Image (spheres, rainbow, N blue to C red):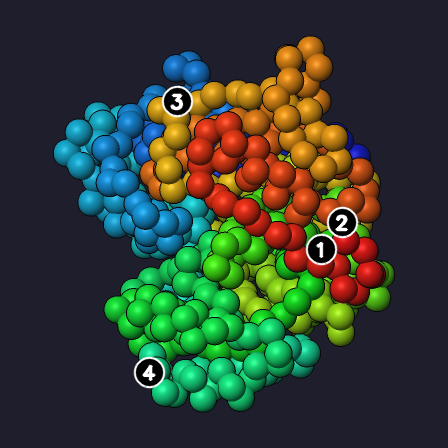
Amino acid sequence: MDLGDEQQRAEWKARLGSMFRDRKVLTGMLPLAAMTPWVAMLREAGARRPLVLATGTGAGPVPTEEEAEVHFLETDHHRSMTEELRAVDHLARHLPEPAAAAVAAYDPDRTGWWLAGPFVAAEPIDGRPVVGGRPAAWLALEDKLLAEGIWSEVGALHAEARVRPVDAAVLRDASADVDEGAGVVWAGDARDGFNGGGDFTRWVLTDEDRAAALAFFASRCDRVRVMPFLDGVPCSIHGIVLPDGTAAFRPVELAILRGPDRQFVYGGQGTTWDPPEADREAMRELVRRTGEHLRARVGYRGAFGIDGVLTAGGFRPTELNSRAAGGLNTLATGLDGDGFTLLQIVCVADRDPGVTVAELEGWAVPAMDAHRVAKAIGMSRRRVVEQSVDLPVVWDGTTLRRADAEQATATVQVGPSAVGAFCRLMGDVLSPGERLGPLNAALFGFLDDELGTGFGHVEVAPDLRTATP
């Protein structure tokens, strides 16, 4: 099969989507705008009009009344992305009474399916099957304390690390053991569930840093991973475990910026940056080995990603994301997002994906290289708007500034979220070879000036491998 042929790819997608044909589908647990692509995908697949349980409006276009039945959930304000994502599975299984009534009215005979993201477990919800959710063994792999063992088992070059209990003296000694001169990074365990977005990660350089980090982890974790601070471009590499092997794609830049008091401030992902060819191929080979390791270890299927840093000495992995992470969604942007989403759902459901590694890579990798994407985003903890707003802007290569709609080269969208506000830049303003980091830093500065989002001054990690800023 040639997925580069639009007709053949359309036929392949139709086969993947046939599992939803004439099916009632319940979905949501996210802002409504985030569900717009899924609603469109379900409609094309022939599903019945879905019921979307939304946690808010979000930023960007939302489904019409014709496209989806929508019920807004009353949810608590979350202080972090980790809290928000941890609440997803519990919310789906303990719906408020009005939402439960909406579900019962939509699907009284329980013939519908829940279409879930990776933060919902695969077990049925109130008698309805869950598609898209993860088995517990796969979710457990995201505990950052397990990563070092995986890198050793697959033969990956990685930074020396220590896993130690949350104890002041023990962590001080472990930090001294691995510090290479720029401090260390502490990452907390998953004792109480998934953590991400840098919420349980601390850059520790001074005594004050150590005391603050210890105070944070003491009530949240039993153990902490200590590893040297790695300087260089934060990036990720993604793959999909298929029946005949593991497909590996191209690297993705992660806009992880350095904020006040050595905080890591998470932005978006982009593919305009290119690492050296040898590093790119080494990263792809690491994905292949890791995918086969996961298959043998837990019967893994579908997408996963490896985050790390391209240091002066090459790529060093730091964590495993056992799901279709944001970087893979970025890679699929402008190619065939529905195709990748359906492929992931089918793989996790242990159905025939109808494609081989050679067929998927043969189409996707050249297409990803040809179509570059720069997704600059931000998640502020301040609720700076109560409904989605669009701000026209111009990017001059250094800063973003407000512009008339006629002069604008991009749009900044800002909408409310369960954490505070979700912000993103819409528009193609970067060329191949340019990095996303400076653009995302400019987005934060613009949002602070215009809306008081509170990101603060941030700095971009340097490209030490190619000696470019």
Displayed quadrant of residue 405: top right
Q: Nearer the viewer, mark 1 or mark 2?
A: 2
Which mark is in front, 1 or 4?
A: 4
Q: Residue at x 44, y 36 (%)?
A: 453
Q: Residues within 10 Å of mark 4 (few under 14, many from 20)?
A: some
The residue carrying pointer 2 sits among few (fewer than 14), some (14 to 19) or many (20 or more) residues within 10 Å by Cα, namely many
Q: How far is mark 3 from mark 4, CA to CA?
A: 44 Å
Tell me which label, 3 or 2, sits earlier in the chain.
2
Tell me which residue sits at (53%, 88%) in the image. Answer: 177
Q: Secondary structure at mark 1?
A: loop
Q: Position of residue 440 (x, y in %)?
A: 62, 42
| Mark toward the start of the polypeptide (1 vs 3) | 1
Q: Amino acid at mark 2?
A: Trp
CA gap between label 4 and label 2 equals: 40 Å
Q: CA distance from mark 1 to mark 4?
A: 37 Å
Residue type of the residue flagged with mark 4: Asp
Dot 4: what SS? loop
Dot 1 amino acid type? Pro
Q: Which circle's residue, 3 or 4, is located before the other in the chain?
A: 4
Q: Find residue 376 and report its horizontal and vertical position in percent.
A: 61, 39
Question: To which residue does mark 2 refer?
Answer: 273
Q: Where does the image place residue 224, in percent across and percent down from the top left?
A: 41, 76
Residue at figure coordinates x 71%, y 15% from the top left: 407
Total of numbered circles in the picture? 4
Using the numbered discs, state the Cα–Cα distance from disc 3 to disc 2 in whole angstroms: 33 Å
CB atoms at circles 1 and 2 under 8 Å apart? Answer: yes
Q: Which mark is residue 251?
A: 1
Residue 462 in the figure: left or right of residue 318: right
Q: Are marks 1 and 4 in contact (CB under 8 Å)?
A: no
Query: Would you name the residue on which mark 3 appears?
Result: 387
Q: Locate residue 4: give its quadrant.
A: top right
Residue 167 is tagged as 4
